[in-house]
Every structure is written in C-alpha cells, then in structure tokens.
Image (cartoon, helix red, strand yellow):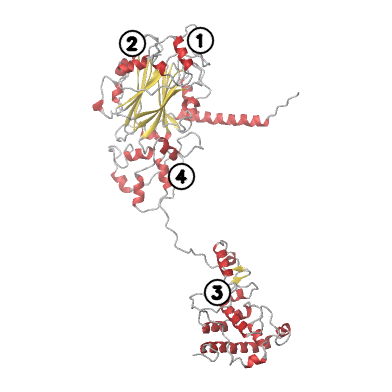
Amino acid sequence: MSTPNGFPQHSRVCLTRSMEGGAVQDLQAKKAGKAAKKEAGGDGAPPKIGTPISETLKLLPEELKANMKIKSITPRPPRKPRLERAASLDEKSWRKWRRFRTSQESLTDPNETSSSNGSLQEASPSPPSKGRASPCNPCCQQDSLHSSPDALEASPGGKSRGGASDLGKRASEISSAFGGLLRGKGFAGGKPRLSQIMPARPLPPMELNVASHSLRTANRIDSDCLDYRHYSQHKFGRVSSSLSDSRLQGNGTLYDNCSTDSMKSTFSVLTPIRAKDVRSRSYLEGSLLASGALMGAEELSRYFPDRNMGIFVATWNMQGQKELPVNLDDFLLPTDPDFAQDMYVIGVQEGCPDRREWEIRLQETLGPHYVLLHSAAHGVLYMSVFIRRDLIWFCSEVEYATVTTRIVSQIKTKGALGISFTFFGTSFLFITSHFTSGDSKVNERKLDYNKTIQALTLPKNVPDTNPYRSSSSDVTTRFDEVFWFGDFNFRLNKDRETVDSILNQNPGTDVSKLLVYDQLTSEMSRGSIFKGFQEADIHFRPSYKFDIGKDSYDTTSKQRTPSYTDRVVFRSRYKDDIQAVKYSSCPVIKTSDHRPVFALFRVKVRPGRDNIPLAAGLFDRDLYLIGIRRRATRELLKRREQKDQRSSSICSIS
C-alpha cells in the first residue's frame, strides 16, 4: 500500500520509529551537555562533520520537527534487489591490500586491540559507502541503529545541507558501516582489525615425491662436482631405480624421495626393513632374486641400477727407479671422463724398491673414498686393487697366485702375478706380466703366455660362477671377466728411421701406420696368443723407449726402436660385458723409460648368492690412515705456501 507521495507505507512507519527514538535521545543529550549548542552556532546552522545524528535532528527547524510524522523521507530503493551490498572502489582496494597483508599486529598487540564499539569511536573513517540503501530489510536496519547508539554517534558522514534527503543518506551510511563492522570490517587504531587468516580454498594434497635433486654422490673426488644423476643418464645411462621404492609407496605412507635417491647412490642410507622380511630371508643360501640377499639383485640395483661399474686398469714399468713421481693425479685421475671409477687396479713391472711407499702414494692420491682391497707382489712385480669404500662388503675373499718364467734369475723380474675375487655374482681375474724382452724373441713371449695360463692356480676357495664353461688348462676360462696387462715386450718390426719418419709425419694420434708393424697385433690376429682377448683401439704414441725426464725417444748408442710394449687386453665369458671407454698413456710422468698406460672400462655386473666366502669388509686400515694423513698434511702445506706468497712483498730498486 502506498501513500499519496508514492512511497511504501512500511517505510513511513520505520522512519517514524527512528525519529521518535531520536527525539528521546535529544532530550537526554540536552541534559548531558550544552557544549554542542555552542559549537553549532544557532538554529539552522549546518552541522560539522562528525556531529552525532541526535545533534543534527536537534538543530533542524521547528517546522520540520512538527511535520516529521506527516512527511516521511526514505532513501530511494535500489532498482534491482541484490543479495549483498555493492562494494565501493575504496573497499575493493582495501580488500586487496588486506589479502596481501601478512602481519597481524592488531590482533596480537593488546594496546591496539579493542571491542567493536571502541573501534567505532576512533577517528579513522570506515570504508566509504555510496548513497544507496542496504539491501536488507529497512526495519532491521533501524532496529540496529536503536540497539547501538554509540555507532550512531561515531559514524562519519558528509556535510549536511539541512535537507531530509541528506538525512536519509546519512542513515544509510551508518547502517552500512555498522553492518560491515558486524562482518569483521571495522577499524581500530587506524589499522584494520584482521580476522583469522583462512585459506580461500582447501590446500592441495601433499605429493609423495618431495625429492631434492641437489643430492650428490661421492663418485668424484672433488666436493663441488656436478650432479652425478644428471651426468650418468647422458654419459653412462645409469638411472636411479630401486626395488625398495615399491615397498614404501605401496603402503601409501609419505616418504622423502631424497632418502630413496641417496640409498640408491653410493652414499646410501639405511632403508627400513619389515619384520616379516627378516623372518623369511636366508643369509647363507640366498638366491639370485631373493629379497634381502646381500649379493642379490635388489642390493645390486641399489648401487648399480644399470648393472654396470667402472674399472680403471693401468700398467707401468718403473725401471726400478727409487724416485717416484711428485704427482700421480694425471695418471690415476684423468680429466676425461669427469668422474672417478669404482675400482682401480694398478700393475707395476720392475717396481721401486720401497713397495710400501708406492702403495701409500696410491692411497694418498685416491683419497678417503677408496680402500686397498688387496695387494700382492712377485719379485718386482706389484699389483694393487683399490675399491670404493662403500663396495667393500660385496667382495669375496681375495686370492692370488704367481708364475715365474725365468727360473735362472735370483730376482724375479719376469713372470706373472694374478689376483682374483668375486664381486656380487661376477668373478674377476687380473693378471700383470712381464714377458721376455728382445726385438726378435716373439716365440719366447708366446711361451711365457702359455706357461702363465696353465700354471696360474686360480680360483682356490671361491667357487667358479660357471664351471661348465671352464677349462683346467686355461685359467682365463674360469672367470667371467679377465684383464691382462703389463710389459709384454712386443716390438715394431721396423727400423728406427722408418718409425721416426712416421711419427714426425703424424704428430697427433693417428698411429695406424705404425700398428701395421706391431708384433702383438699380428700374433693376436693369427690366434697364437691371447686367444679370445680383445684390445681397444690405440690412439697414443709408443710408450717405449724414452730418455728419462725427456719426451724424446732413445738417443743412446743403442737407438732402440720405439714400440708399444705396455698393453692392456681383456676378455669376457659373455658378449659385450666389457666396453672400453678410454685407452691412453700418461706422457707427463717421465721418471722411467716407459710411459704408464691405462684403460677405462664399463663392466656388466650380475647378482650372486650369499654362499660364497666373503672378505667381511677387510682392507688395509694402516695404509688408509697413513695415506689420508699425508693427503691432509699436503693440503695444509699448500695453503700455508699460498698464504706466505700473499703476505710476502718484493721490493725492486731501479
């Protein structure tokens, strides 16, 4: 029902209630204080900003007061009903600022925290509102005004012009501000009173994989090496994978993939073991695929996911020199490839008198990541086997045997020395030999080879991994992987002048013209020696015979022909188990008339059984401690020298 003015009747009733309540408040305000009249300056004067609504009603003309019940003024209703009050631009910017606000000082500071009514008494304005009424019921708005007189007194408003429309706007603004306060948008102390921060939407579920790819292994001596996992995928194809991952993921338990990544590398951490696995595992008679077997497939995959390991094999005729090279880094740790190998096997012919000192120097160079698994000697033939410290538990007992090819000599300078052991399920045999010397003594060298393969009594206690493919007359057939290296003394069937001319024409690595005259290459092609063995391609200059301390070949009266006397050959029971990565010499070591020759291999490793006699983690601990102590001392001396060089000053007088 509408009035003659066109406004709804319920609006008149609500506003009438508001005016009656305001008149009562005016009577109370007259008794409480007369200072407001003096500030107003008389009837009809415009009120100041911030003047309470009761004072505004008191200062209205008498005619308006008399007709207040007759003339009802209400705000203009919105054109379309809305479910929520429209936010102004200032309110939107304030909300945006609040969203990025991280501090909650107003909630934690007791001096700034106050009640809702107290927050309205501050001088800071609330978010401004446009002159539209709230979409809620007007009666409810007026009731809320009556129930909170403090809010009416403190609500900010624009400058009143004495019009009834301005009064309606002010009432709408007060109701809007009070409604915002009830929703937690009040102000206190010039700072917003922030409610408890809650996420706008549910947080995403935590992923199972929380790995950190900065995890590195110790597969290089330097601590600031590149990421081994990334490098291995491109260089060697070693991708981290473990059978233990399925156990952790199968339970649905959250796990840190850093732990599983590290346990698959050589810096392993202990993996959880179920009680039922402990009950069912067999430590003595483990099968190839048994879960928990020390030499089984699961343990092998933890350390070598691609079942390939790196082996460094080197040979060097030291010529019996007492003086050892100052630095062996270029020999044992070549810059290509970037990463060190898992196993180092070094054979020496005519070794230095102090064999222990030589082994200490090897340990000092390789550092704390490697331990001496075994070393043996036969006269002046030395062999040392170093292995990664983490892999010592997967080696069987180490066995060795020797063969003498020159019985007449009191000092055993010619002969062979063999070391064998089983790593996981793969058996290895390493032989270093020194055959008969002489340009024309090819047949004598063949006899040395035949005597070695027949008289070398290996293996002894460690069982053969495949006895059906073994031969009692050839020791090299009784092992899966065989590496034979040493000073074989095979020469070039050409005079010195021709060899020098070829070397001068090809100062680089093209030595194919020289290999045409190589005795060992021709004998191996005929099958008269090293049957079933292979040799990597040669791209280095002859390793014999040099003037000591120089890069020139023999300049003495004998004028010996440069030759490839120092060689590394290999054979395997299974095709493509051994892949040669690099085959080269070390020209920077010049303490002998021979240059060291080394080869890098990638060798396939197979799982084994736990019923073999194990080495039980034994290694030469005394040698390890001496080598590491020397390494630390050398580093300290180097730093001290660098410090002294910086602190010293040189004065020059011109």
Work out whether mark 2 precedes mark 4 in sequence or the reverse, and give the earlier one: 4
Q: Are dots 1 and 4 in contact, CB under 8 Å?
A: no
Across and down, in percent, residue 148 comes to: 58, 81
Q: Which residue is mark 3?
A: 180
Relative placement, left or right, of 351 versus 42 is left
Q: Are dots 3 and 2 in contact, CB under 8 Å?
A: no
Across and down, in percent, residue 629 comes to: 52, 30
Quarter assignment of residue 99: bottom right
Amino acid residing under circle 4: His
Q: Are dots 2 and 4 in contact, CB under 8 Å?
A: no
Spatial CA span between label 1 and label 4: 56 Å
Q: Which residue is mark 1?
A: 555
Spatial CA span between label 1 and label 2: 28 Å
Callout 1: 10 Å neighbours few (<14), some, many (20+)? few
Q: Is residue 290 visible?
A: yes
Work out whether mark 1 precedes mark 3 in sequence or the reverse, and give the earlier one: 3
Q: Secondary structure at mark 2?
A: helix
Work out whether mark 3 precedes mark 4 in sequence or the reverse, and give the earlier one: 3
Spatial CA span between label 1 and label 3: 103 Å
Q: Which residue is mark 4?
A: 213
Q: Which residue is mark 2?
A: 443
Work out whether mark 1 precedes mark 2 in sequence or the reverse, and give the earlier one: 2
Q: Nearer the viewer, residue 124 or 415?
A: 124
Callout 4: 10 Å neighbours few (<14), some, many (20+)? few
Amino acid residing under circle 3: Gly
